[in-house]
Image: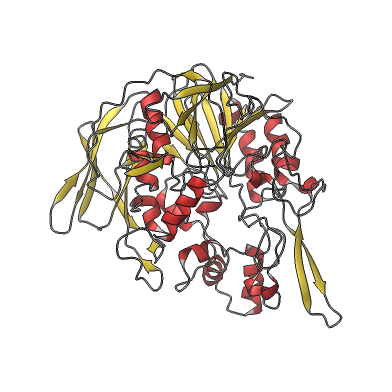
Amino acid sequence: MSVLRYYLLVLTLAIAGFVIILSVAVREAPTPTTTMPDQSPFLTDPFLQFPTATSVRVVWFTEFRGLRHTVTANNHTELANTTRLTRTREDKDSNLPDTESLATPTRREIWRHEAEIRGLTPGQRIPYIVSSQREDGEILSSEEFTLFAAPAVGTPLKILLTSDHQLMPMTAANLQKVAETVGQVDAVFHAGDLVNIPDRASEWFDSDNGNAFFPCLQGYADYDLQKNGRVTRYRGAAIVQNAPLFPTIGNHEVMGRYSGETPLHAQFNDAVPRRVAKERYEENAIGDDPQVRQAWVKANSFNTDTYEEIFSIPHSDPGGKTYYASSFGDLRLVVLYATNVWRKPQTDETIKGRYQERTEDLDDPTKWGYGQHIFESIEPGSPQYEWLVKELNSPEFRSAKYKIVMFHHPPHTLGGNIVPAYTDPVPQIDRDETGKVTAVRYEYPKENDYLQRDVLPLLEAAGVQLVYFGHSHLWNRFLSPAGTHYLESSNVGNSYGAFWKTQTRKVPRDNDPNYAATGDPYGLEPVFPSIEPLKNEVGEPLPYIASNDITAFSIFETETGTVTSYYFDTRNPESDVRKFDEFQLTVR
């Protein structure tokens, strides 16, 4: 059994909560009429990116460079630009044939093709196909899909709110039920953690477990979900061929220090702060060339290169592709780069964790993890914060009917990943009388949480109606006194549990106000689902879904301003999808 398949099996069996299901059955929408073949002729089907008022970009991937790649739409053929992904690799843990023999990570050639279709009329869907000519002259063509420019103000839209796919067991079932329940959506807002290890190509494109990122969102998944001794195959749905995908950087979009030798999962877990890499560059006196310095610091800290090379995202100054804003119909979407490295919560000194370094690493700071450090600063004075202030005061934002902000890290949740506070780790280093380091611990003062202290007041003052996020793999929502809704709809592929009442998180110390063991650490009470909450074994309603059997998704409908959440019980494949919660965004 491969490492990845074993990991998925463990997650499927973990944290199985007992619930009583009482909710509203939903009449299934007509299944989209496109009959999908068993697989795409390419590594991916085309998908839509970066819509503007008069254009949209079409992107697809192949494993050959090819001679010519085109998009044909509205009787016009546009030539695509082709680039190569620079960091995609496979290793012995990749879920592909013949990779177990790989001694070191091996580069995998992946080619990206992109064409911008211009001159479009807002609100008009037009058919398109893409074609790629191989080096031997053979021409491969896609099925016919539809594209469109950014919708005009007043256009009724259905938007899928999703996150934390990560090749998890229920992801293909979740997306298949989206299409069966609401039909074709008009956009996908993804709050991060698209895959597990971003430089492992097969996790994006063709993992043998049948549950890779693009196959699930394009209807080519081939995942066998086993529940109660019964196996059901799920295919996902053809969603992003016909609707633009708006992604977010989560912690699983960030690779750590680059290596040609160590396994990819080890590199992923080996991120260190930029400041540490910069200090080491200066200590080693490598040189004064700015390009050499920049490349060395990135290779010796962390990077989002693969994520940035895969997606076409509105460019922000100075954020590049890491944070951005976009207008889409009646809404303005602001996407922030708010995530940190994930470290284990255990306080065992044999673990490089959130709260301490391993004892065996104390003499060698190059092996330290530096706690749960933040990748991109968002505190006042930082480039991202200043960009956000400017965006919230822009005409595009202020005039939008709906103002939505999306990022990965939870500002309010019952999940485990909200502790410790979203702030820079404060190191506490103990030394003996000779100056030898005997312990390194990290504290996270709750009052210094950058999201709570600095970002949320800014968003609420600007009239943001919905903050959408992920990371903790559960469904729950909150409402602030200012009227801002906070939604996490990340119980897509699996769950790690909710911590409410008697259920407690792993924290470094009991009764320490900096580390809340239960509930939302920042004082908001969860809102119980408005239609039919799940219930526990004694019949008490639950304000969350945290299940490895029940998968949830949410749909925002701009015509009414309604956010509706649904769930599907994978233990009963013939059961109806259930509508369990609904709330409305207030136009301010």
Q: Position of residue 254 (x, y in %)?
A: 53, 56
- Left or right: where 444 falls relative to 570: right
465 or 507: nearer the eye? 507
Q: Quadrant of residue 230?
A: top left
Is 568 drawn above or below residue 342 in the view shown? above
Residue for point 40% across, 17% down: 27
Q: Position of residue 550 (x, y in %)?
A: 49, 34
Is 238 drawn above or below residue 361 in the view shown? above
In the orientation shown, which residue stands out farthest toward the right? 433
Q: Position of residue 493 (x, y in %)?
A: 47, 41
In the orientation shown, which residue stands out farthest toward the bottom? 434
Residue for point 58% across, 28% down: 403
Q: Position of residue 213 (x, y in %)?
A: 40, 46
Point out the image quarter for the C terminus: top right
Point out the image quarter for the N terminus: bottom left
5 or 483: nearer the eye? 5
- Left or right: where 194 falls relative to 453: left
581 or 435: nearer the eye? 581
